[in-house]
């Protein structure tokens, strides 16, 4: 997965996402899954066809011409829900041709998250993505295998099957498989964490990454979430990681802000004070 940092590409993605939400209106789970698969397919086509990719992202070409090219090449190859989304993506301005590809992949993932949201399973998907990111990030050999673009695709698929097959939500498994297949070369744990944060944003919440020396029970996590919500004046999703190395207390990161209440953090602060 890739983050779109340029303002023009962010605006293009926002406009395309509005079209995506319209395309999912009234759609059943199978239709949304099909829409996501087609968006992934278009992104894969553009990734492999540099001339077409540049043509559809060329801001010097009128939007109508770029959209006509989409209709000519893809009009009979993608469904009625997917076509308007791709037309919108081709008609807006992206900062770089690669951003169009990343944008289509992101839209496909958003479509799957919408499916989970409408089924009332977005919380579960978000939690599973976060936990999988931590599990994979904690096993360097596994992460290298799943992130290696030269590794055997069937072999990686088998590993994913052993890791998540039948153990997580269908949407979670599909998202993980697509990340492995479509984003080789990138650390899978980072991509999963971004997806978990994207899931949280779908519910207009911020994500608090919490490291605790000991596990917190459900009531403690709820109290922590309520406290953070009062501090930040908005809903907060708590992602908890148990880390005995911090010595005690909590380390909380919300965006760029870090609240360090850990024993090790206080010791480090004391050492800094003594050295001044």
Image (cartoon, rainbow, N blue to C red):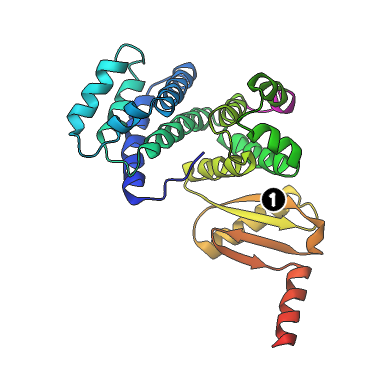
Which residue is pictured at 72% across the width and 54% down the height? Answer: 220
Q: Is residue 267 above or below residue 114?
A: below
The residue at the point 79 percent across, 58 percent down is 213
- Label 1 neighbour load within 10 Å: few <14, some 14-19, many 20+: some
* Extreme residue in the top direction: 76
Residue 78 % position (x, y):
36, 16
**Foreground of the two, 159 or 19:** 159
Q: Residue 80 appears at what percent x and percent y?
A: 32, 16
To which residue does mark 1 refer? 240
Residue 141 on the magenta span: no
Q: State which quarter of the image contains the C terminus.
A: bottom right
Query: Is residue 168 positioned above or below 194 on the image?
Result: above
Residue 155: quadrant of the picture: top right
Q: Left or right of 164: which side holds 121?
A: left
Q: Residue at x 32, y 21 (%)?
A: 83
User: Quick one: 95 or 122, which is closer to the camera?
Assistant: 95
Q: Position of residue 51 (x, y in %)?
A: 33, 28
Q: Is residue 123 above or below residue 46?
A: below
Tell me the magenta residue range: 162-169
Tell which of 172 and 90 is nearer to you.
90
Left or right of 121, for residue 40: left
Expressed as whole percent of the image width and height from the top left, the position of residue 43 reads 42, 27
Q: Which element type, helix, strand or loop, lies under badge 1?
A: strand
Which of the 4 quarters of the picture holds residue 95? top left
Q: Decide whether residue 168 is among the magenta residues.
A: yes
Total numbered labels placed on residues in the image: 1
């Amino acid at each position: 997965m890739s983050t779109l940092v340029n303002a023009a590409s962010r605006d293009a993605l926002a406009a395309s996402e509005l079209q995506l939400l319209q395309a999912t209106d009234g759609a059943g789970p199978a239709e949304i899954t099909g829409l996501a698969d087609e968006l992934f397919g278009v992104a894969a086509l553009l990734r492999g066809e540099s001339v077409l990719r540049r043509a559809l992202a060329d801001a010097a070409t009128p939007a109508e011409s770029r959209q006509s090219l989409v209709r000519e090449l893809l009009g009979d190859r993608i469904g009625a829900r997917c076509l308007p989304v791709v037309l919108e993506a081709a008609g807006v301005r992206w900062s770089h041709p690669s951003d169009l590809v990343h944008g289509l992949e992101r839209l496909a993932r958003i479509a799957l998250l919408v499916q989970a949201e409408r089924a009332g399973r977005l919380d579960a998907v978000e939690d599973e993505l976060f936990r999988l990111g931590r599990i994979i990030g904690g096993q360097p050999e596994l992460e290298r295998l799943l992130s290696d673009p030269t590794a055997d695709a069937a072999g990686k698929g088998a590993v994913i099957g052993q890791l998540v097959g039948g153990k997580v939500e269908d949407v979670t498994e599909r998202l993980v498989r697509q990340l492995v297949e479509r984003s080789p070369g990138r650390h899978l744990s980072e991509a999963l964490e971004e997806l978990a944060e994207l899931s949280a944003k779908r519910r207009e919440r911020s994500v608090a990454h919490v490291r605790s020396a000991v596990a917190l029970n459900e009531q403690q996590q709820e109290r922590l979430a309520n406290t953070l919500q009062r501090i930040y004046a908005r809903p907060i999703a708590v992602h908890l990681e148990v880390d005995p190395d911090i010595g005690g207390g909590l380390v909380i990161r919300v965006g760029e802000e870090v609240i360090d209440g850990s024993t090790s953090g206080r010791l480090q602060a004391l050492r800094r004070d003594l050295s001044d």
